[in-house]
Amino acid sequence: MARLPRLGFGGAAVGNLYAAVSDTQAQAVINAALAAGIRYFDTAPHYGFGLSETRHGEALAGCDAIISTKVGRVLQPIASPARERHGFVDAAPFEPVFDYSYDGVMRSFEASLQRLQRNRVDILLAHDLGRDTHGEDHPDHMRAFLDGGYKAMRELKDAGAVGAIGLGVNEQAVCDEALDHADFDVFLLAGRYTLLEQTALDGFLPRCEQRGVKIIVGGPFNSGALVETPAGGPIHYNYALADAAIIARVERLRRVCAAHGVPLAAAALQFPLAHPAVASVIPGMASPAQVADAIAWMETPLPAALWSDLRAEGLLHPGAPTPASRAAA
């Protein structure tokens, strides 16, 4: 697998997630990421139903960039789509349909290559498997993937059309389940190993380290909960309004960071990278200003006492590596 940079670019926002972004704005934010030295870009057919991939293809044409995209849905043309569908606004006129079969994965991959204007991708991820996503249909989708889609991904990797394969999911449990049946290079796990949520340390991350599976941390801010917000502003977690317990924990994290004079977002962005299984973090970026913020947070010095205070407050898992502990190793 290609060596991933510590900071990558999450491409859902340029697929018009929650808000419309013009082609010009999308080009500007990807150009800003390139100018800042970011060379890893993650996208998916689901993001704007092809829109994010198309915009990445246009902006990254001729660029030496690492690209990951996903399979597990095929896009079917529709007439007169609603303005907002599945969280995407003014997206392309397609409907995403889950399909983890061999043929579905191959069809999805070929369409992605056309939109990305490439003949291969560095990382291919099976998107949104899991019981939280599919409920009672999860066993059928997992069976279709293991019996068909996984075989397709392995063939693509063996043929050199893909550099590495894995899952791109929001659920830790489905990664553990997949490891029971097959081998993977990488998991893109969104929101499950962050400054706010660290249960992945209880077995899962050690298992990945033992198996040589790398982790890409998506959603390092837990849907924005770990980014500084104006006083009284709403706090979101896991794509919805946060409950009282999450709000209280975020405020405790914020107070400890403030006592050390560092932004909560800087601690949140740097924390996951201390684990040896974590290769990259990929916050979503919707504007050049957000690119600049991410770069600044990655470069913010964080005192060792910050991590010891967070642990003393019960806000860090007892076994969580920190940037300070890794630097001292």
Image (tube, rainbow, N blue to C red):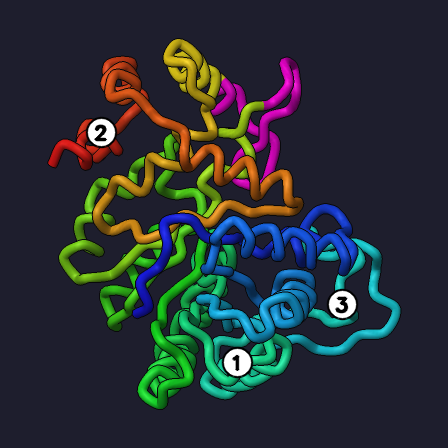
For disc 1, the marked residue is: 109
Neighbor class of circle 2 (other Cα within 10 Å; few <14, some 14-19, many 20+) is some
* Disc 2, SS: helix
For disc 3, the marked residue is: 92
Q: Does the magenta run of residues contain 230?
A: yes
Check whether the beta carbons of the residues at disc 1 and disc 2 lie within 8 A of each other: no
Residue 174, picture quadrant? bottom left
C-alpha distance separating marks 3 and 1: 18 Å
Q: Which residues are magenta?
A: 229-247
Three-letter residue code for mark 1: Phe
Q: Is residue 49 visible?
A: no
Using the image as rendered, state which of residue 201 and residue 44 is in the foreground.
Answer: 44
Residue 112 locus on image (x, y percent): 58, 77
Three-letter residue code for mark 3: Ala
C-alpha distance separating marks 3 and 2: 45 Å
| Residue at position x 44%, y 40% in the image | 220
Left/right placement of residue 48 relative to residue 158 reads right
Which one is in front in this view, the residue at disc 1 or the one at disc 2?
A: 2
**Mark with earlier residue (3, 1):** 3
Q: Is residue 306 visible?
A: yes
- Looking at the image, the residue that sits furthest to the right is 80
| Residue at position x 48%, y 34% in the image | 296
Which quarter shows the N terminus? Answer: bottom left
* Disc 3, SS: loop
